[in-house]
Amino acid sequence: AHGRLVSASGGDANAVLRSGLEQLKDNEDRGRMLHELGRLALADGTLEPKKRIASAETVLEEAKALPGRDALGWTKLLEGDIARASKQVPRAKAAYAAAGRGRARFVEPRLATLLVEGERGPNLAKLTQLERRSNDAAVTLALADALADKGNPGGASELYEKVLWSDASPRNALGSL
């Protein structure tokens, strides 16, 4: 979350996250941080799309070098995000499915799968069900965005308020792919 705030305020989020990455010892935490670095690369508005993807792929190679299975879910999640940004939906779905196999309560790949599935937006019923089960601010934010897109500003407003006043910081609050 701190990296997103630094990025939104015009700072160098990459440097902030890199310095945090050097201090991490746990491979799962390092995988999560590398996933965030890859997401920032994909969202970098100063680069053209092909360079964003190449930058994220560089981070992906670094994540793939992490030993053990602990970081594998985050690595596959980044792989799916890159495929999604490249408009390779089947490859993205496969990577998200592989990311979800690592941990039963890993909500990020399930959310990403729902967001990449439909041409006309995510399936509201499945997204609502995931929001109720997970109680995750990122899922609530995605549901609010979907409701707003579907023309339900009242429902979206309630959910945006819920995210705003939640303790958890949504993983995509300052920009999504």
Image (cartoon, grey):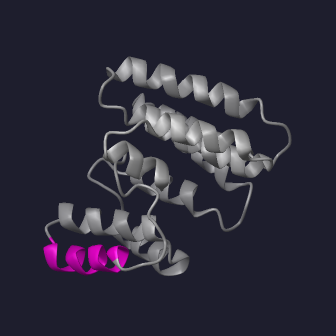
Residue 97: where, in percent of width, then height?
62, 49
The segment highlighted magenta reads 152-164
| 161 to the left or right of 112 | left
Is 157 a magenta residue? yes
Image point (19%, 66%), residue name: 148
Can residue 67 be seen here? The reply is yes
| 23 to the left or right of 153 | right
| 12 to the left or right of 49 | right
Name which quarter of the figure residue 86 lies in: top left
Residue 58: where, in percent of width, then height?
59, 22
Is 111 a magenta residue? no
Which quadrant holds the C terminus? Answer: top left
Q: Main secondary structure of the magenta part?
A: helix
Q: Is residue 113 above or below residue 166?
A: above
Residue 39: where, in percent of width, then height?
48, 40
Image point (33%, 22%), residue name: 47
Can residue 76 be seen here? The reply is no
Name which quarter of the figure residue 108 lies in: bottom right
Return the residue nearer the eye: 79 or 6: 6
| 98 to the left or right of 160 | right
Q: Is residue 98 above or below residue 14?
A: below
Image point (65%, 55%), residue name: 100
Image point (47%, 77%), residue name: 167
Residue 150: where, in percent of width, then height?
19, 64
Q: Is residue 8 above or below residue 171?
A: above
Query: How many marks on residues?
Result: 0
